[in-house]
Amino acid sequence: MTMTARYTMGLALAALLAPAGLRADGPAFDAPPQDAAGVRIADASPAPDAQEAPEAMGPAQEMPDPASLQQELSLSPEQKEKLKVIHRAGREKRQLHQQKIQALITTLSDQLLAKAPDSDLQGTLDSLKAEHRAQQADQDAAMDQAQAVLSPTQAAQYVIHLRDKMKEGLKRWKARKD
C-alpha cells in the first residue's frame, strides 16, 4: 500500500475514532473554556464515551460496524467475525489512549494556569506527542489487520465508505457552524 493511501486511511480512521470531546463537532469545540487572561483551558470533564452516550457521536465518527458493512462489502461470516474482534480491540485501545490524552491536556492546562516553567510544559507536550504517536501506531495496526481480512476490492470499498462518512460528518459540522 502506498504512503498516500495509508495516510488517507489513517486520517479516515482517526476521524471516525476520535471521541466527541476532541472532534471539531464535539462539545469541546463549541465553546472552549478560557481563564481570565483569555488562555484556553482544558475541560475537566471526560470526553463522552461512544458506548455510554451514543447520541454524542454521529455516524461519521463511529467505528463502522461489521454487521452494517457486511452487505455493502459482501463480507463472509468469517470476515465479519474477524472484523468484530479487530474493531472491539481497537475501541478498547482508543478509549485508553483518549483517557491518557485527556489527562495530559488537563495537566497542560493546569500547568499554564500555574505558570509552570517551560521545561514542565515541554515535558507534558512531549508526553502528549508520544501518546498521539502510540495512538496512530495502534490505528495503523488495526487498519493493517482489517485489510489482511479483506480482499483488495473490499479494502478499496472500505476506504471509500470511510471517506463518504467523513464527508457526511464535515457537511453536518459546516451546517452547525452556519
Image (tube, rainbow, N blue to C red):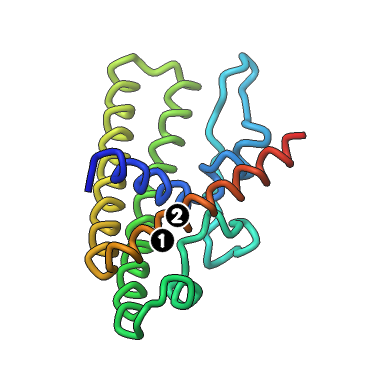
- Direction from residue 32 to residue 3 in the image, left or right: left
Q: What is the CA distance from the residue labelled 1 to the residue labelled 2? A: 5 Å
Residue 53 lies, in percent from the top left, at 60, 63
Q: Is residue 87 above or below residue 163?
A: below
Q: Residue at x 25, y 45 (%)?
A: 134
State the image quarter where residue 125 is shown: top left
State if disc 2 and disc 1 touch (CB < 8 Å): yes
Residue 21 lies, in percent from the top left, at 55, 45
Q: Residue at x 60, y 43 (%)?
A: 170
Q: Secondary structure at mark 1?
A: helix
Q: Crowdedness of circle 1 by 10 Å Cα count: few (<14), some, many (20+)?
A: some
Q: Residue at x 36, y 67 (%)?
A: 87
Q: Crowdedness of circle 2 by 10 Å Cα count: few (<14), some, many (20+)?
A: some
The outermost residue toward the front is: 153
Label of residue 157 in the image: 1
Q: Is residue 33 above or below residue 4?
A: above
The outermost residue toward the right is: 178
The quadrant of the image that shows the C terminus is top right
Q: Is residue 118 above or below residue 40?
A: above
Residue 129 lies, in percent from the top left, at 30, 33
Q: Amino acid at mark 1?
A: Gln
Residue 35 lies, in percent from the top left, at 61, 22
Q: Nearer the viewer, residue 178 or 75?
A: 75
Q: Residue at x 65, y 61 (%)?
A: 55
Q: Secondary structure at mark 2?
A: helix
Q: Which residue is mark 2?
A: 160
